[in-house]
Image: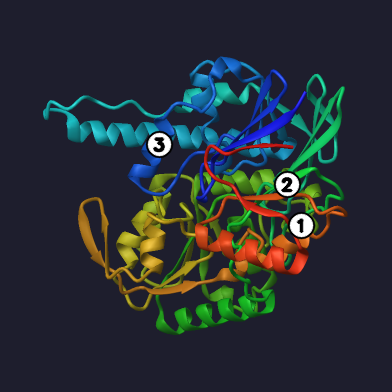
């Protein structure tokens, strides 16, 4: 029996990870991610899956980020009743992230229907609800790192630490049949070699085919020392200007990195002069998960008897009332809030109150996809629209590349260099410029047989 892979989501783009593995008559979905980045892109999440739901035997997820897991509730709502295999910490994070995504879908539909009522246009239904998400989590099956799990007869999966976020995994799929054993390795999202909290990605020695992300395939991150220097300058400048600092951050990964770095650099950054707010209910819950699974990474993010970062002036704001009080502060607030691409969430309220103030600072610490508000601000937008009102962008914008949770070109090539053979590698999860640059370097320096995956393309492993 042959082992084949068909590329669908995140082929030629960065979000919506989705691949179809066929092992003889059996079908497995590898990833089931939400497509993000603007209204037109998000509408694609309502399109049918590339394989009939009743034909899917199992689902495997590499990690909890919504662009890898966020369509699982749609799949379950549409009738999927099989197992969904994840690393143990990934389930704990999905228990937070998927219901939150469902809640946001409900609110988006409610907002749209307010506009449609009385116009004669049909009302819309949410992509899925909080309840759909909670039901889907009941189908999760967990495994620890390096543990072999039988997914189907003759098909085994192992999760290896990818160093991206808590529970993030390199997925190794092994298929045994009468004709022999074949192995497929999917990188998932690979971490940065100098990541503050997570361990480096695990090297895999052999594969017959590799699917590899390429998000930052065309660039090198600044060194970690330079990143610390850059953040030092931002805080010094903001302190002198007597403004606020806004940090839109992904609630899983980037938020915990920032809290760790603030504790480590508390005196250097003079943080005793600030009040630090984690203004994200989901970020607070995710940080608690990081506390429960602290054995999966190598630094002391928390004290031995505490679930909180070691920051004396640290405030967690769970309720909307607590969040609104922050906006009364004109100076001295560092506000970490979602979403990481400024595409929704509480960061919008803080932008509304600060984006027009030149004494304030906006610190961008993660990838900003095309079509998102964060990308428009980074690209130099003179004004932004929030809740129907225009706001002039006068806030000082800083892009800190060294805090990425994704490996850069050097990291990606180093990880591929860990294979003792030279397996064919298919690039996914990247924009065209990044993929072309990475493919060129891998061919020249590693003699790697690199193919940029195309949507709908099928390969045999």
Marks 3 and 2, Cα distance to the nearest angstrom? 27 Å
Q: Point out the image quarter for the N terminus.
A: top right
For residue 299, say whether it is visible. no
Q: Residue at x 64, y 65 (%)?
A: 440
In this orientation, which residue lies closer to the viewer: 236 or 384? 384
* 403 relative to 321 in the view: left or right: right
* 124 relative to 425 in the view: left or right: left
Image: 82 above or below 394:
above
**Residue 227 image point, x, y percent:** 62, 75
Name the N-terminal-most of marks 3 and 2.
3
**Residue 330 image point, x, y percent:** 36, 70
* 42 relative to 84 in the view: left or right: left
Q: Which numbered disc, 3 or 1, marks the residue closer to the eye? A: 1
Q: Which mark is residue 416?
A: 1
Image: 314 above or below 181:
below
In this orientation, which residue lies closer to the viewer: 267 or 68? 68
Q: Are marks 3 and 1 in contact (CB under 8 Å)?
A: no
Marks 1 and 2, Cα distance to the nearest angstrom? 9 Å
**Residue 458 image point, x, y percent:** 61, 36
Residue located beneath label 3 in the image: 44
Q: Residues within 10 Å of mark 3 (few under 14, many from 20)?
A: few
Image: 393 above or below 33:
below
Q: Residue at x 64, y 52 (%)?
A: 451
Q: Point out the image quarter for the C terminus.
A: top right
Q: Are marks 1 and 2 in contact (CB under 8 Å)?
A: yes
Q: Which mark is residue 210?
A: 2
Image: 101 above or below 138:
below
Q: Residues within 10 Å of mark 1 (few under 14, many from 20)?
A: many
Q: Residue at x 72, y 55 (%)?
A: 449
């Amino acid at each position: 029996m042959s082992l084949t892979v068909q590329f669908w989501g995140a082929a030629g783009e960065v979000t919506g990870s989705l691949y179809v593995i066929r092992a003889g008559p059996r079908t497995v979905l590898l990833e089931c991610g939400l497509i993000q980045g603007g209204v037109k892109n998000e509408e694609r999440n309502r399109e049918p899956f590339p394989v009939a739901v009743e034909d899917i035997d199992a689902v495997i997820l590499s990690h909890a980020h919504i662009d890898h897991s966020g369509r699982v509730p749609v799949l379950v709502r549409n009738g999927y009743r099989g197992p969904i295999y994840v690393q143990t910490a990934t389930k704990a994070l999905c228990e937070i992230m998927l219901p939150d995504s469902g809640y946001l879908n409900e609110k988006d539909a409610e907002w749209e229907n307010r506009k449609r009522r009385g116009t004669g246009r049909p009302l819309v239904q949410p992509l899925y609800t909080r309840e759909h998400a909670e039901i889907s989590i009941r189908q999760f099956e967990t495994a620890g790192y390096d543990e072999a799990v039988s997914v189907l007869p003759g098909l085994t999966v192992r999760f290896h630490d990818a160093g991206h976020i808590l529970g993030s995994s390199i997925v190794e799929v092994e298929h045994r049949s009468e004709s022999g054993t074949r192995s497929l390795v999917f990188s998932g999202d690979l971490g940065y070699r100098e990541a503050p909290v997570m361990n480096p990605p695990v090297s895999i020695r052999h594969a017959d085919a590799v699917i590899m992300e390429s998000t930052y395939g065309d660039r090198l991150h600044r060194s970690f020392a330079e990143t610390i220097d850059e953040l030092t300058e931002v805080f010094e400048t903001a302190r002198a200007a007597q403004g606020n600092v806004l940090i839109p951050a992904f609630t899983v990964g980037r938020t915990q990195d920032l809290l760790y770095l603030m504790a480590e650099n508390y005196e250097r950054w003079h943080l005793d002069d600030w009040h630090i707010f984690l203004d994200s209910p989901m970020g607070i819950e995710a940080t608690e998960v990081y506390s429960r699974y602290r054995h999966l990474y190598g630094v002391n993010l928390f004290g031995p008897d505490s679930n909180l970062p070691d920051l004396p002036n640290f405030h967690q704001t769970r309720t909307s009332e607590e969040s609104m009080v922050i906006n009364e502060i004109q100076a001295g607030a560092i506000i970490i809030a979602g979403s990481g691409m400024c595409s929704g969430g509480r960061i919008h309220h803080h932008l509304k109150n600060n984006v027009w103030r030149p004494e304030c600072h906006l610190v961008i610490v993660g990838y900003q996809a095309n079509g998102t508000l964060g990308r428009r601000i980074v690209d130099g937008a003179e004004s932004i629209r929030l809740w129907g009102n225009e706001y002039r962008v006068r806030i000082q914008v800083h892009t800190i590349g060294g805090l990425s949770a994704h490996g850069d070109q050097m990291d990606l090539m180093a990880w591929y260099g860990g294979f003792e053979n030279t397996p064919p590698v298919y690039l996914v999860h990247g924009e065209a410029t990044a993929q072309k640059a990475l493919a060129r370097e891998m061919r020249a320096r590693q003699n790697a047989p690199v193919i940029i995956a195309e949507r709908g393309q099928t390969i045999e492993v």
